[in-house]
Image: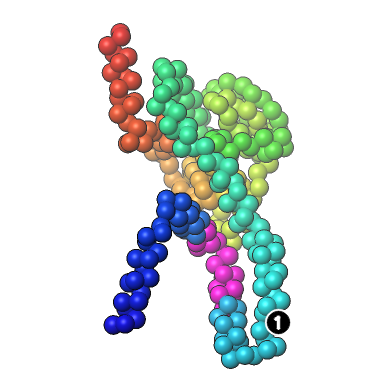
Amino acid sequence: MGVINQIIENFFAIMRTFQLKDAVDIIAIGFIIYYLIKLVRETRAVQLVKGIFILLVLYGFAYMFKLTMLTAMLNRFFEFAVLVLFIVFQPEMRKVLEQLGRSNYTYRRIKNVFSDSSNEEDILKQKKTISVFVNAVMQLHSTKTGALIVFERRTRLGDIANTGTIINATPSLMMIGNIFFNKAPLHDGAMIVRDNMIYAAGCILPLTHNENVDDNLGTRHRAALGVSEESDAVVVVVSEETGSVSIALNGELTRDYTRESLTHELNQLLIDSETEVPEKFSFLSNGRKEKKKVEQ
């Protein structure tokens, strides 16, 4: 009982000195740890983390039983551990920094609450663009013509676009069909779609590093997965062998889309995810719309 009472007294002593900055500090550390664990669980780095944990246990064992040589060796190893981690986890570190670079997403969603009617015009334009691409993809599907279309979102793909030919043209059924026609010079590369325009074609995409990808998937699908792993792009793939339509997003591939399901998915990924207003701000958006009706 004495030990329990001491623990309780220590707890209340700490709570009496607890301040707002301490809460912020704890939340920030918790947030970082959560995302690091999430990141590690989704990669092969989890095996390396297990190895580091075993070394920590071994270090505790050596320190407890005063194994001088083993303790000194592990001490030397942990002195350079931070540098080693940066080298070993370089791909994961890059992924974290890229995700931080996309953190303006929440700001953009909140900003949409205060946007004017031009936002509605943008949505109509996006829907029209999606309709054009869906019609083109279905035509390519029917003729089993291979295609790779990358819809750029928050992550700019200028370096990838520079590997192809800059077009910057309004999308149309005939233009998309001509670009992916199997005798055309740009048909083997990817098309980059930026701001409702065909920005570039014939682009070279990075291949996926995922070793668990289905062996039946060809270079076109592996390239789609690769660019979706390194960016937040939505990638539509038409198989040259089967004509099946797939979407690559965040390193995952979903397959066998129909006209209706493809339209729904692209609308959700390219429009709804950008314009959706958080619930706590929805009253502001509703108020703006009601005010607009009254003025009319």
Q: Residue placed at 58% from the left, 51% from the top?
A: 96
Q: Amino acid at mark 1?
A: Met
The magenta stretch is 36-54
The total number of labels drawn is 1
* Magenta stretch: includes residue 50: yes
- The residue that disc 1 covers is 73
Front residue of this view, candidates 266 and 250:
250
Q: Residue placed at 60% from the left, 48% from the top?
A: 97
The answer to whether residue 144 is seen in the rendering is no
Q: Residue placed at 58% from the left, 21% from the top?
A: 170
Which element is circle 1 on? helix
- Compared across the picture, whether 157 is left or right of 103 comes to right
Q: Seen from this angle, which residue lies furthest top?
A: 296
Residue 76, compared with residue 283, is above or below; it is below
Question: In the rendered image, which quarter contains the C terminus?
Answer: top left
Counting from the top left corner in percent of width and height, residue 153 is at: 54, 35
Counting from the top left corner in percent of width and height, residue 128 is at: 45, 23
Front residue of this view, candidates 248 and 53:
53
